[in-house]
Image (spheres, helix red, strand yellow):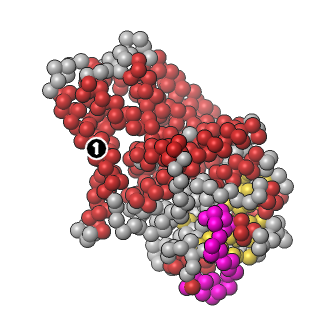
Amino acid sequence: MSERTHVPKHHRTPAGVHAPGRPAKIMLHVFVFAAFQSMLYFAVWWFSPQHAKHWLLFIPLSIATFWLFYESFIYWFYLIGMKVPRHRPAPEGRSVDVFTTAAPGEPLEMFARSLPALKALRYPHRTWLLDGSGNPALAALAHELDIERIDCSGVGGAKAGKINHALTQTDGDIVLVIDPDHIAEADFLDRVLGQFDDETVGFVQVVQAYYNQSASFVARAAAEQSYGFYGPILMGMHGYGTPIVIGANCTFRRAALESIDGHAVHLVEDFVTSLRLHAKGWRSVYVPEITARGLVPEDLTSYFNQQLKWATGMFQVLFTILPRTLTKLRGLRKLSYLLSATYYFSGVPILLNLLLPIVFLFLALWAVEMPIRGYVTHLLPFAFCFLGIHLLAQRWMRHPSERGLQWRGALLKLATWPVYVLALGYAIARVDVPYLPTPKTRGDSTAPLLVLPHLVVIAASLAALIYGWYSPLRDFEGTQLMMFFAGLNTLLMLPVVFIAGTETLRRKGVLR
């Protein structure tokens, strides 16, 4: 195995993963309470009658402004609910099938790394390659490793279709589904099987971590976006009884899957499968341990394609499946699924934040009239509370290397707004988006159209900034505030253009 793909032991989750103790819980509640007070402090000032000038413009600006508060609320909701399950030793005698899938075009080298690791899992099991690749070399590799192969050529339904097809040809009571890019630790099954001693548990999810996150800025940024989710958020979901299936590294009870007629076939098949299992009354467990590491997208094209698939799928669920299923969910599960399903709406408030300053400056229409100093002064308490909670939550990240400000992930999320807006349009118009596996290697090119929206925003924001500077209304507080936002938006959109440019230059050999 090459140095780049080796998974050293120090990359494992540190021993003794614990939920917050009493002192930590008190501190979290104090910080969250203070943060809510700072929200109210800012909101009372923001909605002061003398600040609103045009209510038709003030309302969308307020929605865009307060979306950050909404997303913060979601994070804090899960923070204060964090729990960790007690480890249960894996019992002897479980019948376990391990499934990994193969699709056309996936690199043979990836399977040469991941398949031996699956074969080497210590707990007795049968390893199955659900092979839809049509690659004779992969079939030969599976035979060489003595891994059983199920021919999935012509099987529809993408990954979920292969899983359902394999369920009809296997009989293990427990089924681990692991993506082919993930290199499993030998004790993977030992860490999760004991949870199935509780006959009500339908599936057990573990951390999804990566070994290529240092390959590029995009890889690091995409990985950073997952740290909080696989740490505090999923631990909070476990505390509320709502851990969801993630596409990779989930272990199922066969009877649970059979009770919902198999794995859901959908763009977000994992989320829909979770929803159906919880609606059937099955419990789920989140074990916050790194038991395998896989690949994260390394370039903008791969990352944006992945996000388009996920966002479109989640909007489809929110508009069609979730309304029909909510009545079957109990307690906090309803709230948790609703909060999860709204994540990708963030593209709309980001777009509003980008466009409104341009509209205001060119048309001399102000939604608000407030001094920049007052805006910053009233927002600072929230910013300090937000930062304090973020730093406190670092102790529950799943590995020390994940701690920090995660600023790359934040910049990349801001840059993904066109994808999320497009996904919303696709879902509303019912455009069919094909299910494509996330690319396991870097693409050959970065399409200029990927950053065209960002370039348009940058050009329009700079033009509006210059226009406002030379406007006779420059001394108005509303003009100055919108000029501040236009300048800030330009700075926030520049990184993705720089990334796209450097990716293009590297592929042309201009940069190394």
Residue at the spot 35% in from the left edge and 54% down from the top edge: 450
Q: In the image, which residues are magenta?
A: 137-163
Using residue 67 as the reference point, say whether residue 447 is left or right of it: left
> Could you tell me residue 142's position as x and y percent?
63, 83
Question: How far from the left and from the top, in percent, is residue 242?
Answer: 70, 45
The question of residue 140 being in magenta is answered with yes
Which amino acid, by three-letter code, is at mark 1? Val
> Where does the image place residue 360, in percent across and percent down from the top left?
29, 26
Q: Residues within 10 Å of mark 1 (few under 14, many from 20)?
A: few
Q: Residue furthest top?
A: 50
Does residue 258 sit above or below 461 in this rendering?
below
Foreground residue among 286 and 511: 511
SS at mark 1 in the image: helix
Q: Nearer the viewer, residue 15 or 67?
A: 67
| Front residue of 147 and 125 | 147
Q: 509 or 367, which lies in front?
A: 367
Is residue 79 visible in the rendered image? The answer is no
Q: Is residue 276 left or right of residue 346?
A: right
Q: Position of residue 101 (x, y in %)?
A: 62, 71
Q: Which residue is mark 1?
A: 456
Residue at x 35%, y 26% (from the top left corner): 376
